[in-house]
Amino acid sequence: MKQFAVVAFAILLVLLLARLSSLKRPSARPAWLATFFGCLAIISIGAVLPLPLVDEALGGSNLINLVQSFLTVSAFWFFRDAVSVFYLKPKLHSRWTLLLTVTAMAVPFAFIHDRGPTSNTFMADHVDQLGNVAYNIVYMAAVALIVFDLIHLLRRPADNIQKVFLVGLIPIPVACVVEIAYVSTAHFFPYWGGAQLLADAFYPLFYIGVSIVAVAWTTALIRERGVVDRVLWKLRSAQVAFLLKRSILSALRAFRSKKPDELAYALSIQIRNHEIHTQIPLSSRQERAVARLESRFLDLSAVDLTPTAP
């Protein structure tokens, strides 16, 4: 379980730090908040820091378990908001619904007696208490409903990234159903040996799903910001600069250009002019590089000139 959680945490942490500037834009805040709550949720299960150390800050009576549930539900809630903004889909209900959801978890949790000391197996240790069963069912049902809504939102994927989203999302409600089945059977049928198999199936399903979703979300954000496209244009401009000047320093300066596409275009024209004036043909490797660049500009021009429907 810990390995899956650590992988998910690493991906989310990179996203969190890379998107700090997005806090200035209201439309981007749900995505950052989802990542923030997701990181805290993984910390709260003891996958990153020792659980006793985390729980001690809250009194050492397993209150961290309830906090972890709050954080997880909040992470999925804000992620649903972020997806709706990103893909221009309908938003969820008022944030009051989120408050009611976490309150619905807190009420049965309050009826769990003898909660301490800190334990990694808090839920299993108290599975004989009906309050614990109700608390976990509400928690898992809340996560499952939010994710089911996300799956419905992306049920007709428009691109490959949305398909990856669906691949990652589907195991999560399955994991929630498995967990609900576990707490129910372990409480009402304590001598049934299959309950532990259900418990063991939860973490791989849940964290593999979360990791796939995190990778898809990272890819979507990179594509949105044109990061890959800018890097490719920087490489193209560096290549033609080296062909023209035969200087690594010139290639490095071209790579650092703030407008690499415009520079690449200007340099390709200079190369063709040089070829015409000197009557010295380009080598086959040089010709292929410049021709590829020219075809790229032709493709861009064709896109720009494509008429739009009135």
Image (cartoon, helix red, strand yellow):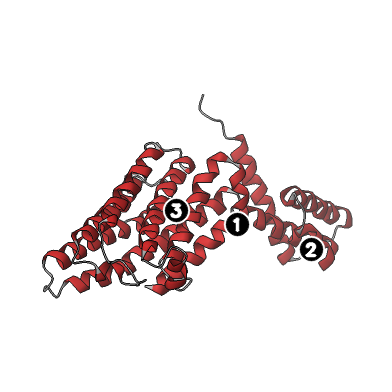
How many residues crowd mark 1 within 10 Å: few (<14), some (14–19), many (20+)?
A: few
Q: Quadrant of the N terminus?
A: bottom left
Provide the residue designation for mark 2. Answer: 252
Residue 220 seen in this snapshot: yes
Q: Position of residue 166 (x, y in %)?
A: 36, 54
Image point 42% across, 55% down: which residue? 71
Determine whether, in the image, residue 127 is placed left or right of residue 144. left
Determine the image quadrant of residue 245: bottom right
Amino acid type at image mark 1: Ala
Q: Amino acid at mark 2?
A: Leu
Tell me the SS state at disc 1: helix
Earlier sequence position, callout 1 versus callout 3: 1
What secondary structure is marked by label 3?
helix
Q: Residues within 10 Å of mark 2 (few under 14, many from 20)?
A: some
* Percent coordinates x, y for residue 101 in the rendering: 32, 46
From this view, report whether residue 104 is shown above or below residue 191: above
Q: Residue at x 14, y 75 (%)?
A: 193
Q: CA distance from mark 3 to mark 2?
A: 33 Å
Return the residue nearer the eye: 283 or 143. Answer: 143
Q: Which residue is mark 1?
A: 18
Residue labelled with disc 3? 161
